[in-house]
Amino acid sequence: MTASPRSPQATPVLQVDGLSVDFGRADDAVRIVDEVSFSLAAGETLGLVGESGCGKSTTVLALLRLLPPRVSARVSGTVKLNGDDLLRLPEKALPAVRGRGITMIPQNPMTSLNPLFTIGRQLEECLDGPGVSPARRRELAIEQLRAVGISEPERRLNQFPHELSGGMRQRVVGACVTARSPRVLIADEPTTALDATVQVQYLDMLKSLQARSGMAMLFVTHDIGVVARICDRIAVMYAGRIVESGKVDTVLRSPRHWYTRALIDSLPPLDRQLDRLPTIAGTLPRPGTITEACRFAPRCPAAHDKCRTDIPPAVTDTDGHVVACWTPREQGSGQ
Amino acid sequence: MLKYMLRRCVEMAGAMLVMSLLVFMLGRALGDPVSLLLSDYATAEDRALLTQELGLDKPLAVQYLTFLSKALRGDLGRSISADRQPVVDSVMRRLPASLQLAAAALLVSLLVGIPLGILAALRYDSWIDHLVRGIALVGQSVPVFWLGIVLMFIFSVLLGWLPTSGYGQLRNIVLPAATMSLFSIAAVTRLTRNSMREALDSDYVRLARIKGLAESRVIWQHALSNSLVPVLTFMGTFFATMITGAVVIETVFGWPGIGRLAFEAILARDFPLMQAVVLVMTALFMSANLAVDVLQAWLDPRVRL
Ligand SMILES: Nc1ncnc2c1ncn2[C@@H]1O[C@H](COP(=O)(O)OP(=O)(O)OP(=O)(O)O)[C@@H](O)[C@H]1O
Ligand code: SF4
Ligand SMILES: [Mg+2]
């Protein structure tokens, strides 16, 4: 067997280095995403986890150059897709990259289909190109709908989004964005709007798409359970910074950052029902308020003076487990 | 789609029926038609004769049914003016001029308003956007009669480029059509700008970009089609403003349409003629709205349900 796609040595398809996003105009700009780095190899799935508002969507939208122009965001760093830096591509070159090189299931797939166009039109427009006849396009569209598990695909092509259930619309979105066999798929909390069983089916569908095409996947969620289910590696984000990353097994079994520990502790235990989930005391700092310190310090049980004056650097151990903390928890100190 | 259209037609017939009843009741409430029709020197016998002739001695319900059945056959009575013409004829003679004016105004509002709105939306927050919004704001707050007089003063009196009134040539229609369309140009511009902004920010436009569609397709197909839905809806309202505008504008510019006919009928207290004008205007307004609804259903599949 050749090198497994999951081995860390495989050359990454996507390499993100020092990605930062500042919102607002120069003088009162607020840093929402701060020096985020990670990489993705073909066939690999990375889970990006963090509380609501920590900057996950901002990060992935910045990768695709899709931040709304209204917020006048300044994006810095590099985002290398097969060697090309997406952040330095001219605007004109983006359509050729999106959908083929890198693609995304956005956070609200329910409203992501155009209400005025049929499913067929919205899917087929992803499939056209020189030398593709309309009949062939139709065939491909039907195939693609089958691949995402939609029943009676021929009939669906002539339907409008409002005629489909939420779960089906979600699948159609998946079909559209993966129609051109992209190398990297970003899924931004694609299942939060779905009920539990549909959620599981959708995740299975994504995994089977991935198995067919060997694309890399960045899975954004605040649900650690989902990460444990489908991801190879995990990156934990807190207030715009990645505080810990590594293999899912390692990180979830012996988290070293105090925030990761708290996140795992707030998971509902599988064996008993609780009336109230334990939550992490305190809230995310308002963006822009903590710059020269560990942003978790106000909520951290182990915080000390240094934490409040200096940003902890990211340290990598031999296993590729990265932690940004001045006093990480001892390795293996389980409960 | 066919079922939808059928339902809308039935609704429209119902509304027309209500309107005819209102017009009829109003006519009876406003006073005794006999005294209106007869001179002050008429004798009691004359009055009785006419009352009988007009059917005014019958119960109201019967009178209404007679009125309705005649109206359906295109008979709305005769004018009380000296020539005693059938009022429907007068209205029909004046109708083409009004339709021309309305069509010109509509065309101009769409041809100017939609591109301006798109431009402002694409150059969001630039000086173009601010300029367009400023003009639109002014355009929506200027009273129609004042605008007509100002335009006439500038282009006819000062510059002498266009006639102050008249009918028949292209140059005659310019000023009245411009006056009539200013308000709707402003409204269409603002609507298009706002709905286009909204569409450009929408999730489906973002998805279109994610799919890797060319920007031209994203804007001209995905965003534009959606931003035209509210513009189309507005056209229903637009016809209402146009009909009230017609009375003023046709009078100011001496345009021989049914708007001025309404004005003349009011001056002459020609009640049968007014009735006819009101009913025809209502029918026009409703047909226009029906057309808008059908267009909308064609554009937006959610409406067809
Ligand atoms: N358009 C915007 N204008 C100003 N601030 C914004 C905008 N979008 C996001 N933010 C801010 O950026 C921060 C990160 O938001 P983001 O949507 O990336 O979080 P998230 O991790 O995706 O949260 P969620 O799990 O709720 O989706 C938040 O503090 C939010 O208030
Ligand atoms: S750096 Fe300090 S405050 Fe931050 S997580 Fe580590 S111990 Fe806690
Ligand atoms: Mg988000």
Image (tube, coloured by chain):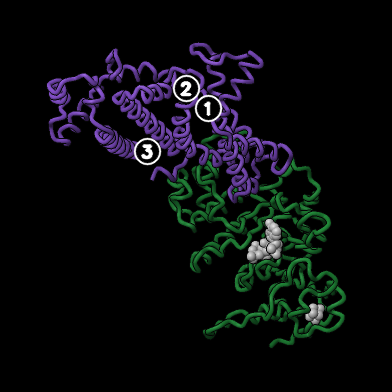
Three-letter residue code for mark 3: Met
Quadrant of the drawing holding the C terminus of chain A: bottom right
Say yes or no: labels 1 and 2 on the same chain: yes
Q: Is residue B300 above or below residue B259?
A: below
Judge from the rendering whether residue A154 lies leftward or rightward of residue B208; answer left or right. Answer: left
Q: Estimate the x, y position of residue B199 in percent, counting from the top left.
A: 59, 45
Q: Is residue A118 above or below residue A150?
A: above
Q: Chain of mark 2?
A: B
From where the camera sits, is residue B104 visible? yes
Q: Estimate the x, y position of residue A135 in percent, counting from the top left.
A: 51, 36
Q: Helix, strand, or loop for circle 1?
A: helix
Residue B180 circle label: 1
- Label 2 Cα crowd, 10 Å radius (few <14 / some 14-19 / many 20+): many
- Pick the residue in front: A332 or A7: A332
Residue wearing tag 3: B1
Q: CA distance from mark 3 to mark 2?
A: 41 Å
Q: Chain of mark 1?
A: B
